[in-house]
Image (spheres, helix red, strand yellow):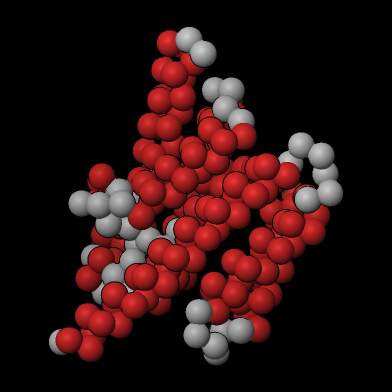
Amino acid sequence: MDLEFYITIALSFLVSYLFGALPFADRISKRKGVDIFQIGTKLAGASNVLRNVGVKSAGFVLLFDISKGVLAVAVAKIMGLDGFYLIISCTLALLGHWNSIFTNFRGGDGLAIGAGLALGLFGIYAVIAGLIAGLVSLLAQKLPFSSLFSIFAAYFVLFFFIYPREGFTHILLGFGVVCLLILIHALIGHKNRKNTITNI
């Protein structure tokens, strides 16, 4: 491994983080006069925008956040990254979404960008998984953590379609770690918000 290889990896990691850090929910909400970090769940995500800003704004946030994930994977692939390094790029994009340098290291829960990462990695299989995840989320909407159930559903669908395919196994397992990080982050965030409300 030469210096050029390490520079390529570093640049790819940086680009992935910056893509993830693009604060679409914050900027779109502010155009409507709303500080998304001071209302609702205080998360910069499509669901919070939907509840507190509007359907159209939430649609744009969802589209742009998914696009961040797709672009992060696309750039990493163009720069020649694969396997472990590709999963690290995905993780850094997610980290950027959670802790954006453009919003004082605040962000969203990562579900939409996670969907974008899956789309960039697995293509049509991610679309199928996303549709099933959406159905699960809809059916379980009255249950706590319905969106988390949808993550499990999506990953199991991906596992069913992709695991038998040679060459995809390591990427699929690595993406499982990314999904686990999203779950842990969401659960910790929910607990912290609940404690904050209790202590008020």
Return the x and y of residue 159 as percentages of the image width and height. Answer: 74, 57
| 55 and 18: which is toward the camera | 18
Taking 63 as reference, is 187 left or right?
A: left
For the residue pair 13 and 38, the one nearer the viewer reads as 13
The reply to whether residue 46 is in sight is no
**Residue 64 versus residue 12: which sits nearer the camera?**
12
Quarter occupied by residue 19: top left
Which x, y percent locates residue 104? 20, 51
Query: Is 129 located above or below residue 78 in the figure?
Result: below
In the rendering, at what x and y percent does residue 13 appear?
A: 43, 32
The residue lying furthest to the front in this view is 1
Q: Residue at x 74, y 62 (%)?
A: 157
Residue 183 visible in the picture: yes
* Residue at position x 61%, y 84% in the image: 140
Residue visible at 36% across and 46% down in the picture: 96
In the rendered image, which quarter contains the C terminus? Answer: bottom left
At 29% from the left and 75% from the top, the residue drawn is 192
- Is residue 16 shown left or right of residue 160? left
Q: Position of residue 112 (x, y in %)?
A: 51, 58
